[in-house]
């Protein structure tokens, strides 16, 4: 999982926005629309990044499609020290 986190959050284009999304949902689970508003990003951009995070098991979804809230996956939480290290390097 460590390698996945490094790749998804720093090794690809858009990693910075994925870090922002992950930090935000770690504070409080939110749906895609709430994330778009709070991060001042386009809704489609947020959806794209959430899909990347979902595909890599970094976040999980709870609820129906439109109203689904996102939160860090158990695997991500188990490796949260790595996420914090990545955040420190990016900030």
Image (cartoon, rainbow, N blue to C red):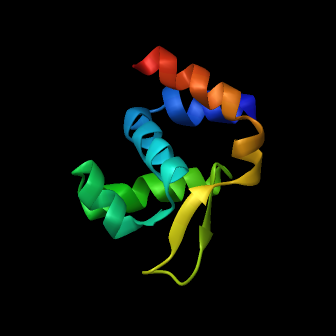
Return the residue found at the far bottom.
Answer: 64
Residue reaching furthest to the top: 89
Looking at this view, is 40 or 51 the one in front?
40
Q: Position of residue 89 (x, y in %)?
A: 49, 15
Q: Is residue 31 above or below residue 86?
A: below
Q: Residue furthest front?
A: 27
Q: Is residue 11 visible?
A: no
Percent x, y of residue 30: 45, 64
Residue drawn at (69%, 54%) of the image = 73
Residue 83 in the image: above or below residue 22: above
Q: Is residue 25 left or right of residue 60?
A: left
Q: Residue at x 42, y 81 (%)?
A: 66
Judge whether 51 appears above or below 17 on screen: below
Residue 60 in view, yes or no? yes
Q: Quadrant of residue 14?
A: top left
How many numbered badges does the structure rendering display? 0
State the residue in front, 55 or 76: 76
Tell me if 4 is positioned left or right of 28 in this view.
Answer: right
Residue 82 rendering spot, x and y as whole percentages: 67, 26
Task: Give the position of the C terminus as an image quadrant.
Answer: top left
Which residue is painted at 56% across and 36% down in the image?
Answer: 8
Which quadrant would the N terminus be assigned to in this image?
top right
Q: Residue at x 70, y 44 (%)?
A: 76
| Image position, residue 23 (x, y; %) | 48, 42
């Amino acid at each position: 999982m460590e390698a996945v986190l490094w790749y998804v959050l720093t090794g690809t284009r858009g990693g910075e926005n994925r870090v922002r999304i992950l930090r935000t949902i770690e504070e409080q689970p939110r749906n895609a629309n709430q994330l778009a508003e709070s991060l001042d990003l386009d809704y489609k951009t947020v959806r794209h990044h959430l899909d990347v995070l979902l595909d890599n098991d970094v976040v999980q979804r709870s609820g129906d499609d439109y109203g689904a809230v996102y939160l860090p996956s158990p695997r991500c939480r188990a490796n949260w020290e790595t996420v914090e290290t990545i955040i420190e390097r990016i900030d």
